[in-house]
Image: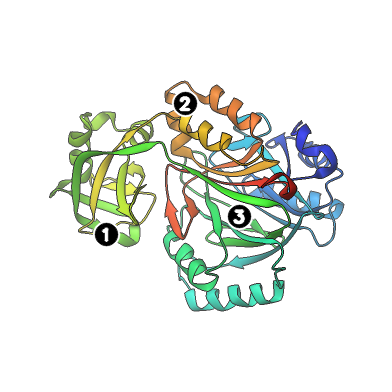
Amino acid sequence: MNTDPAAMEGASGPVAVQADRGGTDMVPTLLDGLRGTNPALVLLFGAQADDLAALQSGLAPHLPPDCVIAGCSSAGEIGPQGYASDSVVAIGFPARHFRAASLLLPDLAALPVSEWMAQLRQMARDFGPDPARHLFGLLLTDGLAGQEDALVATLDAALPSVPVLGGSAGDGLDFRRTSLLAQGAVRSGVAVFLLVETDLTIREVTFAHFSPTPTRAVVTAAIPEKRRILELNAEPAAQEYARLTGLRRADLTPSEFARHPLLLRMGGRHHVRAISAITDDDGLSLMSSIDTGTVLTLGRSEDLIQGFSDLLEALPTPPLMVLAFDCILRRLALERAGLTDRMSDLYRRHRVAGFNTYGEQHSGMHVNQTFVGLAFMRSDDVA
């Protein structure tokens, strides 16, 4: 078992614990790590469908009856010791500092936006937020449904004053099926929204390790609903992307996609439109929405460690925990550069816990190749 011992002191903040995936002792290990937290919310990251169902049935009888349990499968985990694979990370949010409610947003394929908005607004009214405390939202969604852009727009419209961040569930690097746990059941093709209130101070932490180059390309043909680029600069997209990056078509791999992202300028900032695969018709399959006529800029990978370290060190006080939604493409880039141990050490020192995603959500946008996190700090420690 791996547990964050510093966070366990008096259960003053969220507590992370980790167990090997598929092990017979997953439930006892996680319960032992969560002992003393009296959680209002438990997040589970890393398990697939069968394991998520088993964890739900095994954990629920031993947790407070009003504890909200939610989670999803992942493309990798971030536990008390940093990056991990083939594990389950549980994060308990103690009731002395947190209150939470969950809402299932079903049928992503049909996009019942009006119904979702009505449910979200009713959820907020029923929750009855305390204006003296901090309110935020967490979004977990099927990373293969391709509806994150519509989801974040819906949340932003329904709850405009609530900061929302989250991550898209993963499936390793298989991209076949993701699983989400909410309200006692495991499903695919859905999203889970959590409304959370805390008396702790919170700070959003976002970081993307890229900068734009002078190289641009126009999307001359696309299938927006499938997040697919057919042509760049009136050439087959994969071939033109290879030419722009100086790579051979045969050398285009997930690691190269992570090194050479396509950027979309929006709101005065560049955001990654990450590539997940080459399609059979020599197109590019993306992890975010794309439209014909969009101008994209080729990105250049920058320092993966120092800027992120500076961002964490700039927090007003050492965090009790940083809840993390970290793109799998960032992890691939770190692995290629031989920097995973250094990043894991950084995560340990700043008590970062969460999972590797197929996409991240913050500030009303769906992005890729970005670290999106929420730092929790004692209010009396923050000026």
Estimate the x, y position of residue 107 in percent, counting from the top left: 52, 68
Q: Is residue 223 above or below residue 155?
A: above
Taking the image as shown, residue 230 lies to the left or right of residue 269, namely left
Q: Residue at x 36, y 45 (%)?
A: 274
Which mark is on residue 180?
3
Q: Is residue 362 above or below residue 117?
A: above
Residue behind mark 2: 335
* Few, some or many residues within 10 Å of mark 3 (<14, 14–19, 20+): many
Q: Residue at x 57, y 65 (%)?
A: 162
Which mark is on residue 291?
1
Whether the residues at callouts 2 and 3 have beta carbons within 8 Å, the answer is no
Question: What amino acid is at disc 3?
Answer: Leu
Estimate the x, y position of residue 72 in percent, counting from the top left: 61, 50
Whether the residues at callouts 2 and 1 have beta carbons within 8 Å, the answer is no
- Going by the picture, which residue comes out furthest to the top? 338
Total labels drawn:
3
Dot 2 or dot 1: first in sequence order is 1
Dot 1 or dot 3: first in sequence order is 3
The chosen color scheme is rainbow
Q: Residue at x 46, y 53 (%)?
A: 144
